[in-house]
Image: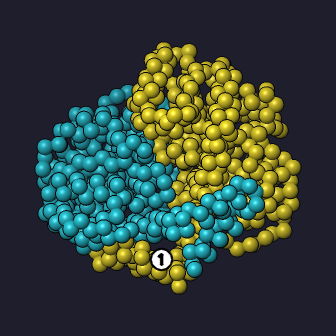
Chain colours: A cyan, B yellow
């Protein structure tokens, strides 16, 4: 957590605010590396962030998330928007590697100076996604992106976290996904703001829509709550994306009007602050006490001499000293 | 975190230790509900846990995880083992609902008194999986299970967390998974102790094996490290499970001999203690300060008046008072 300032942070921050893509890339690398310089970076950026619309894109593997993201970028560019794309890959917590196929499909926009594309590995521990992603969003936001698309790979926990970070969450489905879509449905019915049935030119698209519609109809919604629309697309031919953008905008207007936008952003900031605080505490438990105390407590729990709650009490007491 | 003892906890703990399935089920419900009674439950169980072999089972949707789990239970039962099955469903963080299909397939063992089967929703926040799953494992362990199978649904973060909890992690694959298996591969090559190619009677099984073998060969391993074997199965016909069990046992023997078993269990206990401590802190930030302080700090971050690191500092200082 030290201020290991190298002197070039203020300059990097300045250049990122002016929209320099290399400075943006460098700052997101600092986020990805959980650099100690981030404190200074965020202090320099926080006043310039807050205007971007954050759109999460999720769904099971094979529904065409990357193709859809790419087509959506094209649609937003036609509307004159500056666009950021953050591809968060929670299935690669160790290697930091993005999936090659995804990146290739995004090359349509690689040379557009008004589009920032960045893939980012999410670390696999407490506070990983919820800490680093908001900071990467802040970098793109402060760099002047009007819309930031956050694409996540995979089914499970990560998509729920993405939903917590986004203003609007798109959930993608496609016909013919078999088990995958069944497994996915269980988790995604409560996080989608807009549902997109991609590959809608294939057999079974109408059936997916019917199933989805009846499952959504069963969900209990409060008076005045947002009713998620279902849009059909063929992303590979850029069909239907205009309607997706229209629904994103309609949802954004609803968010702003209902007060939900402010609530979501406050909640995102709370999570980020907590994640930073927790990370700082864990570092202290590990470092200040030389890993000794936590190790001893863990050994006592493994041996059956101490229950984990009593061990946690000891840890917290030692911190309050 | 209070000791809201109802008086029946000691009796429940006693009955669970004696192997009463209803008491086991009740205690796991307390874990799932994050009940304040857990402190007392864990204190009563911790001395009786530590003997069970914990086996994680993961892989992308559609590879036959539940069928494989069921077949593995059958194989372990033939060897006279008492078996616990914990199906953790991170794709259902809200509803708490398990996927019907999975449960149906497990009905083969529903009437066997030496098999505990339990599905558990994992909560979708900091410390969710890493806090509740070890406690559910402790319940099954103290109830006398020789082997506990932890099955997780989905691809992504959750499987990495399961790998952190298990002594041995089985990674399942199957031919013909297309994008799903490609997406999965990126994340699972570093977590599998035993790889299982299920549906090995189908076209493409040998190709999956070849690909997997060459990817595993590329991974850097230290001298004396475990080299993960690849086993082929047809779980629907209970073929190959004897070899899976043999590899699990061989891995377990390696773990014990190399000191890795003790290291994994200590690491699991550390994570559990930390997760409990962090949850207690978050409750204090929320409750003691009446949600007020964190809310104010979050509002300042959203407004751009304060960076999240400075906000975290304020939160931590207020705790140290």
Could you say which is closer to the camera, residue B93 or residue B220? B220
Looking at the rendering, in which quadrant would you find the N terminus of chain A?
A: bottom left
Location of residue A306 (image quadrant): bottom right
Q: How many marks?
A: 1
Residue furthest bottom in the image: B321
Location of residue A32 (image quadrant): bottom left
Residue furthest front in the image: B223
Residue at the spot 62% in from the left edge and 59% down from the top edge: A295
Residue at the spot 46% in from the left edge and 77% down from the top edge: B315
Give residue A175's position: percent from left, percent from top.
Answer: 40, 32
Q: Is residue B317 visible?
A: yes
Give residue B116's position: percent from left, percent from top.
Answer: 76, 42
Mark 1, Cα crowd under 10 Å, few <14 / some 14-19 / many 20+, is some
Location of residue A128 (image quadrant): bottom left
Q: Is residue B105 left or right of residue A152?
A: right
Q: Is residue A101 above or below residue B124?
A: above
Q: Is residue B261 left or right of residue B188?
A: right
Q: Is residue A252 visible?
A: no
Give the residue number, with chain letter if any, for mark 1.
B316
Could you say which is closer to the camera, residue A205 or residue B26? B26
Residue at the spot 79% in from the left edge and 56% down from the top edge: B47
**Label 1 lies in what chain?**
B
Secondary structure, mark 1, is helix
Give residue B64's position: percent from left, percent from top.
Answer: 57, 29
Q: Is residue A258 left or right of residue B23?
A: left
Give residue A78's position: percent from left, percent from top.
Answer: 14, 48
Looking at the rendering, in which quadrant would you find the C terminus of chain A?
A: bottom right
Residue at the spot 69% in from the left edge and 49% down from the top edge: B137
């Amino acid at each position: 957590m030290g201020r290991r300032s190298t002197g070039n942070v203020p300059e990097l921050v300045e250049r990122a605010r002016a929209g320099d893509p290399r400075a943006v890339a460098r700052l997101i690398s600092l986020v990805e590396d959980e650099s100690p310089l981030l404190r200074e970076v965020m202090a320099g950026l926080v006043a310039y962030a807050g205007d971007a619309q954050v759109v999460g894109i999720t769904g099971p593997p094979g529904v065409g998330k990357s193709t859809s993201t790419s087509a959506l970028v094209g649609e937003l560019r036609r509307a004159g928007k500056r666009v950021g794309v953050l591809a968060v890959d929670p299935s690669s917590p160790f290697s930091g590697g993005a999936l090659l196929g995804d990146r290739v499909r995004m090359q349509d926009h690689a040379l557009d100076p008004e589009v920032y594309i960045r893939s980012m590995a999410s670390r696999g521990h407490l506070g990983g996604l919820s800490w680093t992603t908001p900071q990467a969003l802040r970098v793109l936001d402060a760099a002047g992106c009007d819309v930031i698309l956050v694409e996540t790979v995979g089914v499970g926990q990560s998509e729920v976290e993405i939903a917590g970070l986004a203003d609007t969450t798109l959930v993608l489905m496609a016909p013919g996904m078999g088990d995958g879509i069944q497994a996915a449905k269980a988790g995604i019915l409560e996080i989608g703001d807009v549902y997109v049935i991609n590959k809608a030119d294939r057999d079974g698209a109408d059936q997916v829509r019917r199933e989805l519609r009846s499952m959504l109809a069963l969900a209990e919604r409060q008076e005045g709550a947002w009713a998620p629309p279902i849009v059909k697309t063929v992303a590979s031919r850029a069909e239907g994306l205009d309607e997706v953008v229209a629904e994103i905008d309609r949802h954004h207007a609803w968010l702003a009007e209902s007060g939900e936008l402010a609530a979501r952003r406050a909640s995102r900031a709370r999570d980020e602050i907590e994640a930073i605080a927790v990370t700082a505490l864990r570092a202290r438990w590990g470092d200040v006490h030389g890993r000794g105390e936590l190790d001893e407590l863990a050994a006592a729990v493994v041996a059956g001499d101490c229950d984990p709650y009593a061990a946690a009490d000891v840890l917290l007491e030692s911190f309050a000293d």
